[in-house]
Image (spheres, helix red, strand yellow):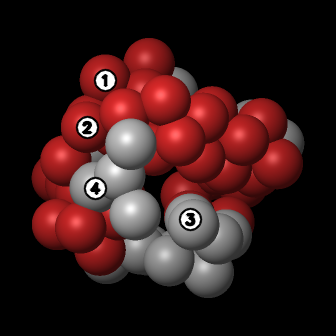
Amino acid sequence: MITEDMTVNHILRFHPATLAVLRRFHLDTEWAGTEPLEQAAWYRGIRVEEIVGALNRVIVQGGER
């Protein structure tokens, strides 16, 4: 399960299937990789709950654990 305190790099390392979602929200490892998801979302003006929900849906649909 992905939480708002995880970094983008951590998410991609353990859940590579989430890359498309992160790109859709314009979150990449170049500028947001070391930032907690909550802070990266804030910088982009996006509700972190929206991103976390989308990322967790990918994990559930893809069968990742």
Query: Which residue type carries mark 1?
Result: Ala
**Crowd rating for badge 4 (residues with CA inside 10 Å; few <14, some 14–19, many 20+):** some
Mark 2–mark 1 distance (CA, rounded to whole Å): 7 Å
Ranked by sequence position, the earlier of labels 3 and 1 is 3
Determine which residue is flagged by label 1. 20
Percent x, y of residue 42:
72, 54
Q: Residue at x 44, y 18 (%)?
A: 24
Residue 2's disc is: 3
Determine which residue is flagged by label 4. 15
Determine which residue is flagged by label 2. 17
Instruction: Determine the image quadrant of residue 23.
Output: top left
Quadrant of image for the N terminus? bottom right
Q: Check contact, mark 2 vs mark 1: CB within 8 A.
A: yes
Q: Check contact, mark 2 vs mark 4: CB within 8 A.
A: yes
Query: Which residue type carries mark 2?
Result: Ala
Q: Check contact, mark 4 vs mark 3: CB within 8 A.
A: yes
Query: Which residue type carries mark 4?
Result: His
Percent x, y of residue 44:
62, 40
Ranked by sequence position, the earlier of labels 4 and 3 is 3
Numbered marks: total: 4
Mark 2–mark 4 distance (CA, rounded to whole Å): 5 Å
Asked which secondary structure carries label 2, the reply is helix
